[in-house]
Image: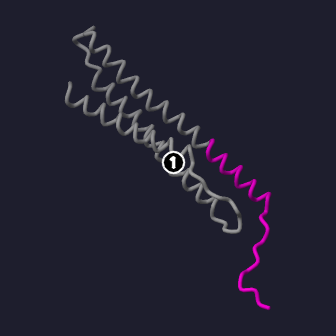
Amino acid sequence: MNDPLPSRQPPNIQAELAKERNRAAAERTLMAWIRTCLSLIGFGFGIDSFVSAIRSLNVSQNINPVRFSRILGLAFISLGIYAMINAAREHHKELKHIQQDEHYLYIPRRSLGLTVAIALIAIGIFAFVGILVKAYFFI
C-alpha cells in the first residue's frame, strides 16, 4: 500500500545540541554588546550631568564648556544606541540563520537578550531626546 504521509526521520541529537550551543553563543554575544552599549550611554549621561553640576556652581564665568559637553554626551549616547541597534539586528539574523534547516526539531523561543536590547534602545532614545531638549530650551 502507498503511504500518503512521508515517514519522518528521527532527530539528529548532535545537530540539535549544536543548534542550542549556537543559540547560547549568540545570546552571550548580544549580552556583551548590551553591557558595552549601556556603558557608552551611561558615560554620555555622566558627562552631561558632570558639566551641568559644574555650571550650576558658577565656578567660572569665562568658560562655557556646556555646549561641547552636551555634544560629547549626545555623541556617546548616539554611539551606544547605534551599536545596540546593530547588535540586536545581527542577533536577530543569527537566530534566523540557526532556524533555517527544516529537518531539525529546534523550537525557537523569545530571546531575553533581544528583549533587553530593544528596551535599552528605547531608553537610550528617550535619554537622547531629553538631553537634546534640555540643551536647546534651558540654556
Q: Which of 37 and 75 is in front in this view?
A: 37
Crowdedness near tag 1: few (<14), some (14–19) or many (≥20) residues, C-alpha within 10 Å = many
Residue 117 sits above or below residue 42 on the image: below
Asked which quadrant contains residue 42, the reply is top left
Q: Residue at x 50, y 51 (%)?
A: 89
Q: Residue at x 34, y 35 (%)?
A: 128
Q: How many labels does the image show?
A: 1
Q: Which of 109 and 64 is in front in this view?
A: 109
Q: Which coloring applies here?
A: one colour
Under circle 1, the secondary element is helix
Q: Residue 133: give x, y in percent of width and height.
A: 25, 33
Asked which quadrant contains residue 129, the reply is top left
Q: Which residue lies furthest to the bottom in this view?
A: 1
Residue 78 sits above or below residue 100 on the image: above
Quadrant housing the N terminus = bottom right
Range covered by the magenta-colored residues: 1-28
Q: Which of 16 and 84 is in front in this view?
A: 16
Q: Residue 7: give x, y in percent of width and height.
A: 76, 77
Q: Which residue is drawn at 30% across and 33% down?
A: 130
Quadrant housing the C terminus = top left
Kindly identify which residue carries mark 1.
88
